[in-house]
């Protein structure tokens, strides 16, 4: 995409009255897919219900419920609910000047923001409770105390930055290099067809020990981790290529087409054929339940 195309789908902060006046804003987005776009401001969003497919800078990712995601102005992205289920996320835009002040207060170097914080993380129940409670306060304050309302939005941004900063530090200090190398291999096309036994061989540990490390560092078993990689690749291939479903099933190492169909439907809610038919990045969403 050239610069002219990027400029044509840019969302400007000046068109948002709250962003223009206060440097921050807050709204809910429910169910609809968004069109491909970027901004001239930063953005945090949190999946509060369901799960979503997120395309960012030409790459796809699955965002489960409770995922916090950070978006920079140069990021081209769009988001779509997974399958036929309902999906909702809270959206927290912030201008560059306001984010610089918040970073200063937290001791985070704004100029190194890209390397200082994680781009996404799954929030703990306690962290989700913080954001949910503040969102409820915003809904109550928006009509009666607008100043306190925007103070609360600033709290959300500061908390999001703090969580992403700590997540980056935790990952870089706790996860051993061999595990990072292993998971990078599993995400590459050469390993899409591998199974749990292949992972045990690559890890050079016994199955129980390997499973222990996967649960500790990813929160998933080896089989669950592989399933998610395969389903994610399948979703992307079904949307962006014309590969047959049988060929895709073989590439992903499934023993039969019916097995692949069952795994995919259990994860997504639709069969591969239904997903290909219904889940193209074409629909344009509309904002719902805008608070400020």
Image: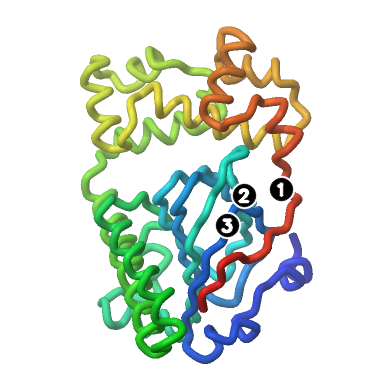
**CA gap, disc 1 and disc 3:** 16 Å
Q: Nearer the viewer, residue 174 or 125?
A: 125
Tell me which corner region of the image, top left, top right, bottom left or bottom right, holds residue 196.
top left
Vertical comparison of 264 with 84: above or below: above
Q: Quadrant of the N terminus?
A: bottom right
Q: Residue furthest top?
A: 255
Q: Residue at x 65, y 54 (%)?
A: 32
Where residue 30 is drawn, which disc sits there? 3
* Sequence-first tag of 1 and 3: 3
Q: Percent x, y for residue 123?
A: 33, 52
Q: Provide the secondary structure element on which disc 2 rests.
A: strand
Q: Residue at x 68, y 59 (%)?
A: 285
Q: Provide the secondary structure element on which disc 1 rests.
A: loop
Q: Residue at x 44, y 16 (%)?
A: 195
- Display colour scheme: rainbow
Mark whose residue sits in front, 1 or 3: 3
* Sequence-first tag of 2 and 3: 3
Where residue 80 is drawn, which disc sits there? 2
Q: Nearer the viewer, residue 233 or 149?
A: 149
Q: Is residue 26 left or right of residue 176?
A: right
Q: Percent x, y for residue 65?
A: 43, 47
Dot 1 alpha-carbon crowd within 10 angstroms: few under 14, some 14 to 19, many 20 or more? some
């Amino acid at each position: 995409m050239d610069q002219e195309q990027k400029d044509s789908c840019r969302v400007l902060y000046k068109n948002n009255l709250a962003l223009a006046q206060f440097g921050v804003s807050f709204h809910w987005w429910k169910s609809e897919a968004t069109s491909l776009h970027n901004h001239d401001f930063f953005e945090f969003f949190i999946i509060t219900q369901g799960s979503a497919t997120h395309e960012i800078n030409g790459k796809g990712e699955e965002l489960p419920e409770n995922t916090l995601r950070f978006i920079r102005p140069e990021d081209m992205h769009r988001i779509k609910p997974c399958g036929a289920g309902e999906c909702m996320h809270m959206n927290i835009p912030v201008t560059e000047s306001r984010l610089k002040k918040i970073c200063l207060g937290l001791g985070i170097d704004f100029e190194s923001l890209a390397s200082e914080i994680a781009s996404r993380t799954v929030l703990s129940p306690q962290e989700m409770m913080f954001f949910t409670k503040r969102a409820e306060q915003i809904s109550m304050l928006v009509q009666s105390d607008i100043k306190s309302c925007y103070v609360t939005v600033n709290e959300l941004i500061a908390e999001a930055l703090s969580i992403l900063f700590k997540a980056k530090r935790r990952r870089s200090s706790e996860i051993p290099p061999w595990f990072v190398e292993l998971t990078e291999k599993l995400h590459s096309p050469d390993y899409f067809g591998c199974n749990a036994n292949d992972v045990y061989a690559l890890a050079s540990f016994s199955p129980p020990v390997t499973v222990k490390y996967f649960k500790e560092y990813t929160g998933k078993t080896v089989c669950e981790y592989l399933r998610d990689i395969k389903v994610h690749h399948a979703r992307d291939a079904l949307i962006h290529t014309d590969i047959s479903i049988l060929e895709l099933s073989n590439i992903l190492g499934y023993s039969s087409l019916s097995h692949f169909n069952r795994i995919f439907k259990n994860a997504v809610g639709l069969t591969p054929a239904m997903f290909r038919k219904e889940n193209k990045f074409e629909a344009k969403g509309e904002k719902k339940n805008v608070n400020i």
